[in-house]
Amino acid sequence: MKVAVLGAGAIGAYVGAALHRAGADVHLIARGPHLAAMRQYGVRVRSPRGDFTAHPRATDDPAEVGPVDYVFLGLKANSYAACGPLIEPLLHGTTAVVAAQNGIPWWYFHRHGGPYDGRRLESVDPAGAVSAVLAPERAVGCVVYAATELEQPGVVRHVEGTRFSIGEPGREISPRCLALSEAMRSGGLKCPVEPDLRGDIWLKLLGNISFNPISALARATMRQMCLHGGTREVIETMMTETLAVAAALGCEVGVSIERRIAGAERVGDHRTSTLQDLERGKPLELDVLLAAVVELAEITGVPVPTLRTVHALSDLLALRSAA
């Protein structure tokens, strides 16, 4: 099995290191000091499950890698449309693209069935720019339940979780998913093949769509948002509206909002990835979170006034932080 990790940051390098341990031919595509460190010392993983070092190949030139069986996308979703020149050398006729992204993926309605089958979401696939680069037929969905951070170039701190749920847009249990699942599990990760990954997408989105933008707007940690009465109420309302949109699309997410918030409070003074991006001057990944669900609400006719308000505020914040 030949795998390229395009965007081998904290999550990408962690997955690449695990697959390399399983015997896969892994190529990490990165740049800068992180690339230099991985070339010289390998990927050094610091984990409560045990530290290890792996030595997959690392490069900044996808043409050196050539066609692969799987491309694991560690890029932010807002950079997918521009990744064509990077991903094209990695593709052959049956290459699978495993997109480890938050939020609603560009392939969401591909082989969805029902009245929305094949529909394109402008918020995540503007003018079809992402589909033109990443054909939905290649997509294997991936929902990440692992928390990692780049401690220093070449060093990944694994905080918690090893689950990477994967699945086909068409809901079949495919040979390509089973093969990837086996390799991931051999490398020490949990990788269930889900018959319908969309449920996992909405379950994870429930937290991302509320905590991420509010954390950036309030410059607050998980614990601070949960303990403040006003923001807690806003988050509860955002989650309720999100579940209503999911239900309108035939996706019932069996989760207690109160339990979900209590779990977030237990995380403590953790800063969401959106808040970290804001503090570092990086683009905010909000289209696949808020804008996509607001668009889905318009399609299904579900009222989402709180999501719309937070989206408007977050959109202005993203524009100002990018200026």
Image (spheres, helix red, strand yellow):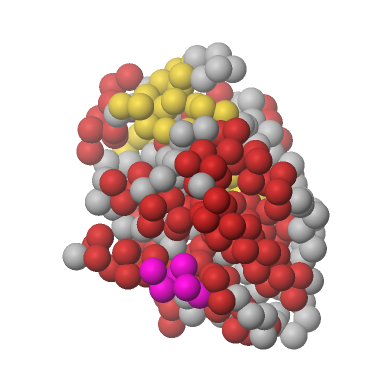
Residue 114, image quadrant: bottom right
Camera-nearest residue between 20 and 110: 110
Quadrant, the N terminus: top right
Figure check: 299 above or below 213: below
Q: Position of residue 31 (x, y in %)?
A: 27, 41
Q: Is residue 39 magenta?
A: no
* Quarter of image, res 168: bottom right
Image quadrant for the C terminus? Answer: bottom left
Q: Where are the magenta residues, as a range?
A: 308-313
Number of numbered discs: 0
Q: Residue at x 43, y 50 (%)?
A: 215
Measured as percent of width and height from the top left, residue 177 is found at 70, 48
Question: What is the quadrant of residue 34 in the picture?
Answer: top left
Tell me: 16 left or right of 284: right
Q: Residue at x 63, y 51 (%)?
A: 204
Residue 18 falls left or right of residue 57: right
Q: Residue furthest left?
A: 323
Q: Please, is residue 273 above or below residue 53 in the view?
A: below
Frontmost residue, 246 versus 64:
246
Residue for point 28% across, 22% down: 40
Percent x, y of residue 249 = 73, 74
Provide the major secondary structure of the magenta segment: helix
Residue 168 seen in this snapshot: no
Q: Residue at x 67, y 80 (%)?
A: 302
Question: How far from the left and from the top, in percent, is residue 253?
Answer: 76, 58
* Residue 285 in view, yes or no: yes
